[in-house]
Image (cartoon, grey):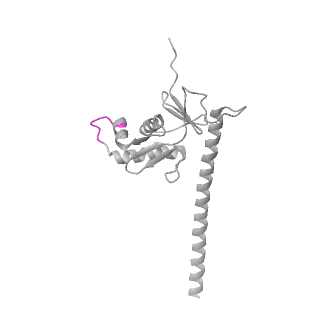
Amino acid sequence: MASQIPETFRFGEFELNVDAGELRRNNRRVKLQPQPFKLLVLLVRRAGSLVSRDDIKRELWPEGTFVDFDQSVNFSIKQIRDVLGDSAERPLYLETVPRRGHRFIAPTVSGQEPHRAAVVLPGATGVRLEKALWTNIAELRLAETRRRRLTSITLGGLIVVVIGVLVFVLLR
């Protein structure tokens, strides 16, 4: 009896084990509800291709299922983005094509091809290199988001101080 290789995909810091129903980040299990997990599997299996909203509906909700489809898909996409630390404005993993569908844009390596690599360097496996590069890109995006948020908070605080000074001067 041949042992079956589990269906797994690696991207960035993440490993998606379809058979176990798990998503892991740096070997730590990440919680993701069943419907968002199914959607993530669908998108990762078709990485690089646009998955239409109709395809998502057919794959995730059987005929005769009554659900607010748009709200359910949007909720699932939001949960996936939250878990992956992704952003709709500057996507790293999941791109939304308005009114058409979604595309998984990160490079993936499946469990069936453990040593596939985009770049091979002496002394480093391509998978580790790809993971390190993608992790750095993710960290840069996160730092950029934090910097923008801090700038907005600082600017907001400065505006409040200026208004306070103006009110103080006008009331004197």
In the displayed structure image, the side of residue 66 where residue 127 appears, left or right: right
Q: Which residues are magenta?
A: 60-66
- Magenta stretch, main secondary structure class: loop
Residue lying farthest right?
123
In the displayed structure image, the side of residue 42 where residue 64 appears, left or right: left
- Viewport quadrant of the C terminus: bottom right
Name the spot of residue 86 as percent of width and height, x first: 53, 48
Q: Nearer the viewer, residue 152 or 101?
A: 101
Residue lying farthest left?
64
Residue in view at x 58 percent, y 55 percent: 145
Please, is residue 165 above or below residue 137 in the view?
below
Give the quadrant of residue 72.
Answer: top left
Residue in view at x 37 percent, y 40 percent: 56
Name the spot of residue 125 as percent of width and height, x first: 67, 31
Residue in view at x 54 percent, y 36 percent: 108
Q: Nearer the viewer, residue 123 or 169?
A: 123
Name the spot of residue 36 as percent of width and height, x first: 44, 40
Please, is residue 34 above or below residue 114 in the view?
below
Give the quadrant of residue 150.
Answer: bottom right
Name the spot of residue 37 as percent of width and height, x first: 45, 37
In the displayed structure image, the side of residue 9 where residue 26 appears, left or right: right
Please, is residue 154 above or below residue 39 in the view?
below
Residue lying farthest bottom?
172
Q: Is residue 150 magenta?
A: no
Q: Report the label total.
A: 0
